[in-house]
Amino acid sequence: MNDIWQDLNQTEQKECTGQELLDRITEEKRERKAIKRNWFMGGIIVGLVVALLLSCGVYLVGMRNNQAAYVRLMGNDASATEAEDSVLNAQVGQKLGVLEDSIQEYYLGDVTNEQLEEGLYRGLIEATGDPYAEYFTAEELLELEESTSGIYYGIGAYVGIDSDTQYCKISSVIANTPAEEAGLQAEDVIVEVDGTDTRGMTTTEVVALIKGEEYTEVVLTIYRKGEPDYLEIPVTRRKVEAPTVEYEMLEDGMAYIVIAQFDTVTVDQFAEKLEQARSEGMKGLIIDLRGNPGGTLYSAVEIARMILPEGLIVYMEDKNGDREEYSCDGENELEVPLVVLVDDNSASAAEILSGAVKDYGIGTLVGTKTFGKGIVQKVFGITDGSGVKLTISHYYTPKGNDIHEVGIEPDVEVELDVDKYVEDGSDNQLERAKEILSEEMK
């Protein structure tokens, strides 16, 4: 009150007494709060506009690589906030101001302006209803980049979304890692991480909770089909060097290559293993995509170019009907019979490869129907280091099939005998693939 009183001149001091002075003080407070709020809202609206005014040509399917770069901001046109079709209008700004005032005046807990601002960005993206859309802070974007590098500190399991429960689940476990040692299994639904309910969280958010400093412990609450209650599984984090491609030469010249995920390193790893198989006398090839949650479009396309005949690999169409095609010159077409193993956890980039193989008829798909993720995301980087991932197009197989929420039917359906697999490691799907390949090699 003294500060406001001292702002008045001598005449006003004489005239403002009693209720008039109280009214003047109240009005002064309102004006100052309004100015502060307007500055705050201006920063928020400008920030949101900048976040949305992005050019194209960013890195594909959640990763940064040599084929793509950070997007540059196009500018900051203040008129964008006034457009009738924009959510960032004056009315929204005023309402956000009221909400902020309410939080500052009445909210019992502690929250910073930075947290509120980040909440606005996340809320805007979450409002799309797209389970694959995400806002990333600068730190989260770096973690995303690390997750595709093949080296990280965690437990050694690939995580995907369980479409039935909207929880994340373990799609596959990497051999000789903490996850395998702790007894985690594919199809385990992750209900909690260290007591935090994961329902509705994205894979990025769940992975961020699971990862941590080396030799620290994380407790996963797991729902496993057939178990009477949730399982509490403690896992000690370690440095994980994830080999995304594994190779083994089976009997009779049958080469067996497992692609666990399509990461940055996967292209070179696959090329190396395929060349090794050829040098060891490969007469037939089994590519195992079971439990493969996908990854980068770039990796899937480059691997497809190592085995497909000349022609279209995949094409994408955006909301405006604009089409982008990826093709193969056929110079490296596979010269031996091929079988591809798939299941309901084979998704996204894994379906691009398996869909092309099926359309061209150059191999036999064995297993169960794939997941059915026929959409593509891009990560748009922002110059402050943050970013946003958005679904930007549908993709289609060479014959024009839209597999989104449909999946790809195998040529030979074989359900995995889970009990036998858990009991002694027998893999009836792989055995059937070997039988089919043996016939085709004759």
Image (cartoon, rainbow, N blue to C red):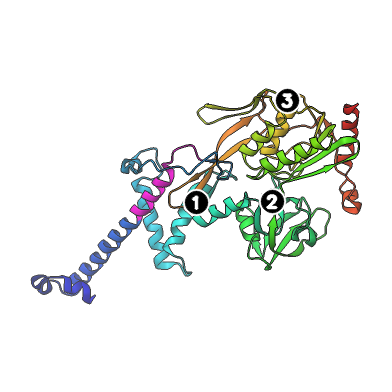
| Residue at the image position 63 percent from the left and 60 percent from the top | 209
Assess whether mark 2 and mark 1 are in contact (beta carbons under 8 angstroms): no
Please determine whether, in this image, residue 230 is positioned above or below residue 289: below
- Check disc 3 and report its element: helix, strand or loop: helix
Report the side of 36 relative to 285 (left or right).
left
| Residue at the image position 70 percent from the left and 51 percent from the top | 158
Q: Quadrant of the N terminus?
A: bottom left
| Label 2 or label 3, whichever comes before in sequence order | 2
Q: Which residue is mark 1?
A: 123
* Local crowd size for mark 3, using a 10 Å CA cut-off: few (<14), some (14–19), many (≥20): some
Residue 39, position as x, y percentages in the image: 31, 57
Predominant SS along the magenta part: helix
Q: CA distance from mark 1 to mark 2?
A: 24 Å
What segment is highlighted magenta in the picture?
41-58
* Local crowd size for mark 2, using a 10 Å CA cut-off: few (<14), some (14–19), many (≥20): many
Q: Which residue is mark 3?
A: 359
Q: Nearer the viewer, residue 133 or 11?
A: 133
Q: Which residue is mark 2?
A: 159
Give the residue type at disc 2: Val
The answer to whether one can see residue 406 in this image is: no
Which mark is drawn over residue 304? none
Residue 331, position as x, y percentages in the image: 69, 25
* Local crowd size for mark 1, using a 10 Å CA cut-off: few (<14), some (14–19), many (≥20): few
Residue 213, position as x, y percentages in the image: 63, 65
| Label 3 or label 1, whichever comes before in sequence order | 1
